[in-house]
Image (tube, coloured by chain):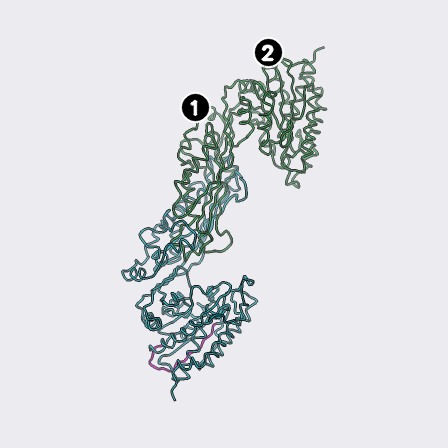
Chain colours: A cyan, B green
Amino acid sequence: MYMSWQTYLSDHRERFIQELVDFVSIPSISALPQHKADVRRAAEWLTARLSSAGMQNATLINTAGHPAVYADWLNAPGKPTILLYGHYDVQPVDPLDQWVTPPFQPQIRDGKLYGRGASDDKGNIIATVQTLEAILRTAGQFQVNVKCIFEGEEEIGSPTLGPAIAEHRDLLACDHIFSMDGLQWGENAAGILVGLKGMAKLQINVYGPSTDQHSGLFGATLQNPATALAHILAALRSPEGKVLVDGFYDSVRPLTAQDRAHLAAVPFDPAAVERTTGVPALSGEPGYSPLERMWARPTLDVNGIWGGFQGAGSKTIIPATAHAKITCRLVADQHPDQIADLIEAHIQRNTPSGVRVTVEKSSGAYPFLMSPDHPSNLIVRDVLTTLYGSAPYYVRVGGSVPVYAVFERELGVQPATMGFTLEDEQLHAPNEFWRLESFDKCQLAYGLLLHKF
Amino acid sequence: MYMSWQTYLSDHRERFIQELVDFVSIPSISALPQHKADVRRAAEWLTARLSSAGMQNATLINTAGHPAVYADWLNAPGKPTILLYGHYDVQPVDPLDQWVTPPFQPQIRDGKLYGRGASDDKGNIIATVQTLEAILRTAGQFQVNVKCIFEGEEEIGSPTLGPAIAEHRDLLACDHIFSMDGLQWGENAAGILVGLKGMAKLQINVYGPSTDQHSGLFGATLQNPATALAHILAALRSPEGKVLVDGFYDSVRPLTAQDRAHLAAVPFDPAAVERTTGVPALSGEPGYSPLERMWARPTLDVNGIWGGFQGAGSKTIIPATAHAKITCRLVADQHPDQIADLIEAHIQRNTPSGVRVTVEKSSGAYPFLMSPDHPSNLIVRDVLTTLYGSAPYYVRVGGSVPVYAVFERELGVQPATMGFTLEDEQLHAPNEFWRLESFDKCQLAYGLLLHKF
């Protein structure tokens, strides 16, 4: 007698929630060396769970750091292959004393499961694996080939995932990638991630006299490194927030009419940003709305400045040096190394005489931009529209997530995102939780997704 | 039988040098509370020494801090009154391990007496007091009325001298003031101090978001306080070093032809400043020579800047705040409070939107400018020309010495300077020394000065 996968999911719901509790109980904190064995234990637990779900070839992929978990089901010849991505590692738990219940002893209160990693990203993983089980146990097969890759280093920037994927390029080859490490817009509104910013990083060092000098004796005849730094920084970004670096915007893909329409459709209240951040007024590149700037325009920020005397009272010196740390958030198609080079050249052109300047460039990150009409996004849109009863917003994030560029570069496939985390769920903070309603939504969503093929 | 005061000085030279040793042995460090009693002991020693020299009414003038020492000889009715100024307090001695012999156990090596305060300023004081004794013991009188005021707080900025002088305005009333706290140009070249710079002090605080914010989430839509500070600082001073504050130069007394001639006469090697300070090139306000800038033009210097992340690596934030400390060195007739107000107004006019700025103004110091042809300077010029066999240079100093403005304000008399310290004598540093040749010169100079009346 045929049983639907949905019925299977609801019949086993109690066991499935217990599995979420078990999974969250493993303190797989990737950042802390003392949890290395716990991270591996979580990977092994997940490998076994994929096997028990009916997935095949479940195995650890060892990397230079924490292992990744792989499994597949490739019994749909002639059909496409999808790769499901998530991460089973979690953030540290400090400050521990602010947790109402211990982070690795999950507890359900008011329909929410509290524990580190519940929302980001273990809940999404286990719910999806359970859906795979539900379909295999009921229908006996998928209409598509399925591969899973779950990494253990997302919370530390996926440092070893790139080489691991490159090494297993054939194993991971696929037509679509769906990442379950993602947010929805709200409890009743869906979102599809189409853009992430990249990054360029550098430090400016301005050297004047070999030691601090008496401002009375030499103030009139030596360049002041702090003033020179001020002129350099002022030459990088206008008072309004437009980046003044020659060539900086040359490779920025302009917003299309569709992009602008998608952005304008998103509910966004600038006054709420002013309230949240406590600033007197928003500020930024002229000619763009705040949301366009935040999601689709590149930025240049001074993250820190220092030089000379910072104590109480006064010390009448010309500082020997002054420094600034700069990061840029990049958008397609800016290249992090090229942008760093443009900035360095601009700095050298705008350095006042009487000082020496060096620029230290750090490795950056590529921006990510995916068409809303990408076939994978069309599938996600259909699923989310069915699930929420309304079309999703097209969302971008001003931050950088290295793994997206890794998939694009190494497998030639842009990942679509469908995760069921919500922004208020205390990610990376004490008392992280996941709504059990999201648990159900995630299971249903991935079931619907698999049936789109 | 009449003995000349010069003969008296040479006859008693051994005793007089021993007195210098005794005076330097008292650790009268005004900056350190644990030496408060030592400072007083030095004041009492000096009071007794003035009495034994034949001066009258020798007494301590108690202040809110360390006492000043007063004495007089007023038996020349109808003649002018001169006030002799010096300071008996000394700088701290750190780092102690760099002293060849202990700072308060003076030792003579190669015709130099080593010890803290030997050159700055105890040597000049004791030599002058001994000259007073020599004249009183030989001629029995001066041709002028003589007052002495020796303070114990010069090394901490004379904080209580102003009120003490105001309180004793009648006691200290005089026609000329001669300060023995001063430098000569070199062993074989004299200098007369005609200018000191004043000071205005302030701190700029730039406030953006209420806490550091994620540069990815908010970088495009919040003003960056560090960038805002850079624009503020860039608006205060040109890349070359011209101060851009509206009205800043309005009350600056222009250089006269005589000033320019006096400055041009001074031997000055810009390349030596480059070598000493290690800068690639000198820099400063266009239209003035380096020495004109250093001695006669006002400046604005950033003494310190800070804000945001200063550690290793990167932290991708918009800093909540950024700060800068500023001091200006002022020239006649700039008023420190007015200049601070002009700067504050200029900052407010040049603050980018999206941040809040406060300016903290500290109490400043007045500039000092004395005519080369002031009667007191004409006397000093005659004495130094006799002593060195050539005319002195007219010298200014970029630093500030508060006591000059105090005398001018409270007694209505500009002090002329005649001291016999040389710049290489490790003032404020380990192994301070005074040339015994300068000891002899100082005695002779003040003897000649007293005979000018």
The local crowd at label 2, few if under 14, some if 14 to 19, many if 20 or more residues have their Cα within 10 Å, is few
Depth check, mark 2 against mark 1: the one in front is 2
Dot 2 falls on a residue whose secondary structure is loop
Of the numbered discs 2 and 1, the one sitting upstream in the chain is: 2
Residue A17 rendering spot, x and y as whole percentages: 48, 76
Give the position of the N terminus of chain B as an image quadrant: top right
**Residue B178 in view, yes or no:** yes
Residue A68 placed where, x, y %? 47, 72
Quadrant location of the C terminus of chain B in the rendered image: top right
Residue A340, image x and y in percent? 40, 54
- What residue is pinned by disc 1? B256
Q: Is-magenta flag for residue B94?
A: no
- Secondary structure under tag 1 reads loop
Which residue was labeled with disc 2? B78
Residue A451: give x, y in percent of width and height: 35, 78
C-alpha distance separating marks 2 and 1 = 36 Å
Confirm whether circles 2 and 1 share one chain: yes
Q: Amino acid at mark 1?
A: Thr
Decide: is A227 above or below A297: above
B13, A364: nearer the viewer? A364
Left or right: where B51 falls relative to A235? right
* Amino acid type assigned to the residue bearing label 2 in the image: Gly
Q: Is residue A304 above or below residue A144?
A: above
- Marked residue chain, label 2: B
Residue B15 falls left or right of residue A178: right
- Count numbered badges in the picture: 2
Observer able to see residue B191 = no
Chain letter for mark 1: B
- Residue stretch in magenta: A68-80
